[in-house]
Image: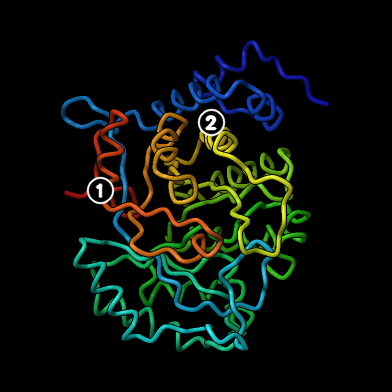
Amino acid sequence: MVTVNRDGLSEKVLAGDRISGAEALELYRLPLEELGTLADARRTRTKAAAYDGRGREIVTYIVDRNINYTNVCNVYCKFCAFYRTEKDTDHYVLSFEQLDQKLDELTAAGGVQILMQGGHHPKLNFPWYIDLLRHIREKYPHINIHGFSPPEFQHFAQVFRMPLREVISEFKAAGLGSIPGGGGEILVDRVRNRISPLKCGSDAWLEVMQIAHELGLKSSATMMFGHVETIEDRVEHLQRLRDQQDKSGGFTAFICWTFQPENTVLKIDRRTGVTEYLRMQALARIFLDNVPNVQSSWVTQGPGIGQVALKFGANDFGSVMMEENVVSSAGTTFRLDASAIETLIREAGYEARRRNNWYELLD
C-alpha cells in the first residue's frame, strides 16, 4: 500500500504538479467542497488565457446535433437501452434524405458540427460509409463530422476486412473531421467484460485513438461510471487516458457522466447521484493535467448541476445538442437551447462563447 502525504497534496495540486494514482485516491476522499476548490484552481491554471477583453473567464459551448445513423447493433451492451436488432420492428438505418433534413435544421440553427454514431451494424459495407461521409462533406462543407467511436472503428475493420489504419485514413479522406470518445465506459477489461463482453477491449479502444491522432484527427475522451466498477477502476481509466495523451496528444476534452439505468439490462443497487458526479469530474480535472478541456455533463445531470459543475473543474458547457437518442432511451431527457446555455453560463459568473470542435472561439 502506497502512503500519501495528505498535508502536502493540496499544495502539489495548486502548484500544477502531476499527481499519482495513489494520490488521486487520497484526493477522492477529501470533502467535496475542498476537492471542488482544488479542481477549480486547476481549471483556472489550465485555461489561464481564456478571458474576454473585460477580464471575465470564458466558458465555451458548441451548437451541434447528435445523429444516430442506425440503431442496429450486435454487441448488446447491458447498459444500453438504445440498440435494436434487425428483428425488432423499430430498427432503422437513416436515408440520405432523412440525414439532409436533420442537417438543414442544424444549419438553420447556426450549428457547426454533427456527432454521428451508430450501432455495430453487421451488414452496412465500406462503400456505404464512404458515400455517407462524401455526401455530407460536399453538401454541408460548414459542418464538422465528429463521428464513429473507437468500438465502431474496430467493428468496421472486422466487417470490411481491412486494416484499422486504412479504415480510419479512408474515412478521413472522405470527410471525417474528428472522433468522439464514445464506447470508453471504463477502460478496465474486467469491468468491460461484465457490462459489454462483445465490445472491443481497452487496448483496442486506445489503439484507435493512437492511430487517429497519428493521422491528424483530434478526439474527445470519456468515462461512463456508476455501475459495476470500483473507485480504483475509475482511477485506472484516468491513468490510461493520461498515458495515451502523453503518447499521442490528440485528446481535446474529457467528458464524464453517470450510468443511466432505466430500461437497461444492467441493474444496480443504487443510482449514482450528483455529488458523486461532481466528485469524479473534479478528480478528473486534477488528474488529467494534459487534457485542456473538461465538459460539464448537463445532459445527464440537469442544467442546474451542469452549471455547478463549472465550479468543479469544467470550462465547457458541452453542446446545445438539438437531438439526443441514446441517453434519453435510458430515461434522461434534459434539453437546452443556445439562449438557455448562455444564460446559465452568465449566471455562474462567466462569459459565454461559442466554439468549434477544436475549441476555437467563433464570432
Residue visible at 72% across and 51% down in the picture: 268
- Name the one closer to the observer, 185 or 206: 185
Q: Is residue 323 above or below residue 301?
A: below
- Please say if the residues under marks 1 and 2 sit with CB atoms less than 8 Å apart: no
Q: How many marks?
A: 2
| Res 236 → quadrant | top right
Place of residue 145 in the rendered image (x, y in percent of width and height, measured from the top left): 36, 68
Please, what is the three-letter code of the amino acid marked with disc 1?
Arg
Element at badge 2?
helix
Q: Whole-percent x and y of residue 251? A: 47, 50
Quadrant of residue 139 within the rendered picture: bottom left
Identify the residue position indicated by label 1 in the image. Answer: 354
Question: Relative to 182, is 324 on the left or the right?
Answer: left
Mark 2 sits on what residue?
A: 286
- Identify which residue is drawn at 32% across, 60% down: 64
The residue carrying pointer 1 sits among few (fewer than 14), some (14 to 19) or many (20 or more) residues within 10 Å by Cα, namely many
> Which residue lies at the image location 53% right of the left edge and 65% below the top edge?
329
Considering every residue shown, the one lying at the far right of the view is: 1
**Local crowd size for mark 2, using a 10 Å CA cut-off: few (<14), some (14–19), many (≥20):** many
Depth check: 63 or 176 in front? 63
305 left or right, relative to 238: left
Mark 1 to mark 2 CA distance (whole Å): 25 Å
Identified by mark 2, the residue type is Ile
Q: Nearer the viewer, mark 1 or mark 2?
A: 1
Residue 306, image x, y percentages = 42, 40
Farthest top residue? 7
Q: Mark 1 or mark 2: name the one nearer the start of the chain.
A: 2
Residue 291 appears in the picture as rendered: yes
The image quadrant of residue 174 is bottom left
| Colour scheme of the picture | rainbow
